[in-house]
Image (cartoon, rainbow, N blue to C red):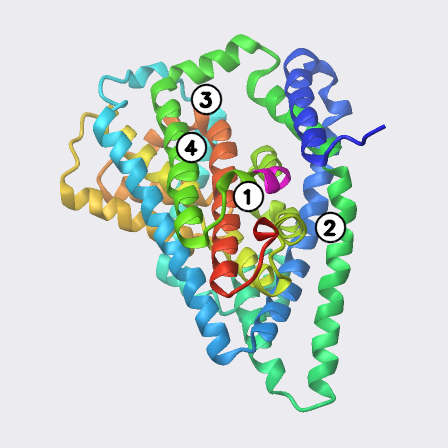
Amino acid sequence: MTKLALHWQIFIGLILGILFGLFATEYVHYVGWMGTLFIRILKMIVIPLVLTSIVTGVAGIGGGPGFRKMGGKTIGYYLTTSIFAILVGSTLMNVFQPGVGFDLNSVEMTAADQAKIEKLQAKEAEFSIVDRLTQIAPTNIFNAMSEGDTLAVIFFAILLGIFIPKLSDPYRETFLHAFKGGFELIMKITLWIIKLTPIGIFGLMAATIAEQTGGDINKLIAMLTKLGSFAILVILGLFFHAFVTLSGLLIFLGKVNPMKHFKAMLTPLITAFSTSSSGATMPITLDALEKNSGVSSRTTSFVIPLGATINMDGTALYEIAGTLFIAQAYGMNLDFGQQILIILTALLASIGAAAIPMAGLIMMTIILSAVGLPVEAIAIMFVVDRILDMFRTAVNVWSDTCGTVIIAKSEGEVLAYDK
C-alpha cells in the first residue's frame, strides 16, 4: 500500500482540526495539547538550529568576500520583495478604499481587546527602531539565547562563522567539526519532528478554531463578513505578491518553474499557515529546500535563518493595508508624504521589530500614532488578525524559499528542478 505523502497528511490534519474545532468544541482540551507541544518542540530547536546553521554556512562561504557577496544578495532580495509587498498593499487600499463608509461602531471592544491594546501601548512606548538595531549586538549571548532573541544570535553566529576559518589548526577543524556535527544533529531531530507534524497541526487548528469561534460556525462567518472587503483585499494582495511578484522573480532571476517549486514547498507552507510562525517552521523549510529542491546546506544554512527573522513580506503588506483601512474608516485622507512615512515605517518593521512578540501589531500602533490616528482603532484588526496571520506567514515562508532558490542559482548551484 502506497504511503500518503507528508503534505497530504498535514493537509488532512489541518481540515480535521478545523472540523473538530467547529463541531467538537467541548472536547478540544483533549487534543489541543498536541498542538501546544508541537509548537514548543519546534521552538526548542530554533535557536540551536540558527546558531549551528549560520556558523557552518558563513564558515563554508569562507567569510570575507564570499560572505559579503552572499550577504549582499540576501539583504538585497529581502529589501526588494518587502518594497514590492508594501506597494501591492498600498495600491489595493488606495484603489478600492474598503474602509470608506465602514461603521466603526460595528466592532465591539471587549475587556480582552482593551487589555491587548494596553499591552501594545506599553510595548510601543518602550520600542525604538534605533535601540532595536543596536541591540542586535548582544551584551550576553546566553541571555539572548534564553530569551529567543534570534537577531542577536544571528549576529553572534556570523562573527563566529567569519573568524573560525581564521584560526590555526587544530582549533579551526575542531570548531568546524563541532558546529557541523551540531547542525547535523539538529537536522536529525528535525526529521523526527516532521513526522509529528500532521498530529501537531490537527491539535493546533482544533484549539485555534475553537478559541476563535467557540464552536459557532455563524461566528466564523460573521468574523469574515464584518471586515470582509478588507480581509478579501489583503488575501488577494498576498496571493498576488506570492504568485505574481515572487513567482515572476523565480522565473526571471532563478529560471525556475514556480509550480515545481510550490509542489516541493507544500509541507513548510502548510505548516507555516497552521502555526503562524515562520521561525517555528524554519527546520521544516530547511529540510524541504535541501531534500526536495536540492539547494546546498551552504546556501540554506545562511539564507533561511536570516529570512525567517527579517523577511516579513506578508506582514509588511498587512501593516500598510491595515493602517490605510483604519485611516479611511476615520475619514482621514492621508497625503503623499504621510503614505511615504507609512511605507518607510512598514519597511523598517521587517528588520527593526524582528523576533519581537506581536511585532506586526506593535509596528501598526507606531504607524497609527505617527499619522495622528488613535491607537485604540487597532481593535478593528483583532476580528480578522488571527486568520490573516496564517496567510501572511505562509507568504513570508514562500518568499524565504524563493529567495533561497534564486540565490542558489546565482551561486551556480544545480537544483533538483534542473535535472
SS class, disc 2: helix
Find residue 328 and report its horizontal and vertical position in percent: 23, 27
Relative to 321, residue 150 above or below: below
Q: Earlier in the sequence, mark 2 or mark 4?
A: 2
Residue that numbered label 1 is attached to: 261
Residue at 39% x, 23% y is 232
Front residue (pair 331, 409): 409
Find residue 154 and report its horizontal and vertical position in percent: 55, 64
Q: Earlier in the sequence, mark 1 or mark 3?
A: 3
The residues bearing labels 1 and 3 have C-alpha atoms spaced at a distance of 43 Å
SS class, disc 3: loop
The residues bearing labels 4 and 1 have C-alpha atoms spaced at a distance of 16 Å
**What amino acid is found at the position of numbered circle 2 in the picture?**
Thr
Q: Residue 190 got which mark?
A: 2
Front residue (pair 130, 268): 268
The residues bearing labels 2 and 4 have C-alpha atoms spaced at a distance of 29 Å
Q: Residue 401 got which mark?
A: none
Relative to 209, residue 259 above or below: below
Find residue 159 and report its horizontal and vertical position in percent: 55, 75
Residue that numbered label 3 is attached to: 110
Q: Residue furthest top?
A: 218
Q: Residues within 10 Å of mark 2 (few under 14, many from 20)?
A: many
Instruction: Between label 1 and label 3, give the one nearer the viewer.
Output: 1
Instruction: Between label 1 and label 2, give the one nearer the viewer.
Output: 1
Residue that numbered label 4 is attached to: 239
Q: Earlier in the sequence, mark 3 or mark 4?
A: 3
Q: Are marks 1 and 2 in contact (CB under 8 Å)?
A: no
Q: Which residues are magenta?
A: 263-268
